[in-house]
């Protein structure tokens, strides 16, 4: 079972690095994608995905498991927030798109993308250290 969790951590890390890299390379398109995703009726699924993706990190037992536990806990706790308040998140993205300048949005997406890459690197490092 431990090998399965380790493989999950590797795959999750690779996906996080790829998505973060795309956000850093094309931040404006990434923001428009997030705006579209948040606007769909299926956005509530994002909360379920966060819960499902974060839970295995809370039980992972390997190198850097404390850091991964915190990542998993944050994801699991953010999931219900998105399930309960999807409209608030939609309003936030719409407000950001209207009120912020392109330069400000780019900086936010860069920061978010770099955080995502860092989390992915931690996941891949944890897999490599086992």
Image (cartoon, rainbow, N blue to C red):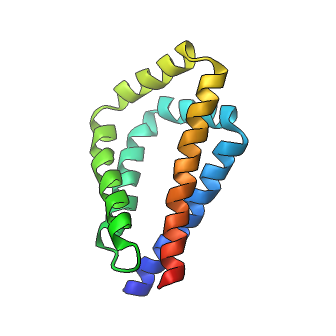
Residue at (35%, 51%) from the top-left corner? 48
**Vertical placement of residue 94 versus 39, above or below:** above
Q: Position of residue 115 (x, y in %)?
A: 52, 49
Residue at (54%, 71%) from the top-left corner? 124
Image-based side of 1 in relation to 23, left or right? left
Image-based side of 81 in relation to 93, left or right? left
Q: Quadrant of the N terminus?
A: bottom left
Residue 92: image quadrant is top left
Residue at (60%, 58%) from the top-left corner? 17
**Vertical placement of residue 93 versus 19, above or below:** above
* Residue placed furthest toward the top: 99
Q: Nearer the viewer, residue 81 or 99?
A: 99
What count of labels does the image hold? Answer: 0
Q: Position of residue 83 (x, y in %)?
A: 31, 40
Q: Is residue 12 visible?
A: no
Residue at (36%, 72%) from the top-left corner? 65
Q: Nearer the viewer, residue 81 or 61?
A: 61
Q: Position of residue 18 (x, y in %)?
A: 64, 57
**Vertical placement of residue 42 versus 115, above or below:** above
Residue 33: image quadrant is top right
Q: Is residue 54 visible?
A: yes
**Vertical placement of residue 97 versus 89, above or below:** above
Q: Position of residue 10 (x, y in %)?
A: 53, 73
């Amino acid at each position: 079972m431990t090998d399965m969790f380790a493989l999950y951590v590797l795959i999750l890390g690779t996906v996080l690095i790829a998505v973060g890299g795309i956000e850093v390379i094309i931040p404006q398109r990434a923001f428009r994608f997030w705006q579209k995703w948040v606007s769909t009726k299926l956005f509530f699924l994002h909360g379920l995905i966060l819960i499902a993706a974060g839970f295995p990190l809370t039980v992972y037992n390997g190198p850097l498991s404390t850091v991964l536990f915190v990542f998993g806990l944050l994801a699991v706790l953010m999931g219900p927030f998105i399930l309960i308040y999807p409209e608030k998140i939609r309003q936030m993205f719409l407000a950001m798109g209207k009120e912020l300048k392109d330069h400000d949005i780019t900086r936010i997406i860069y920061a978010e993308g770099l955080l995502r890459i860092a989390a992915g690197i931690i996941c891949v490092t944890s897999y490599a250290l086992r």
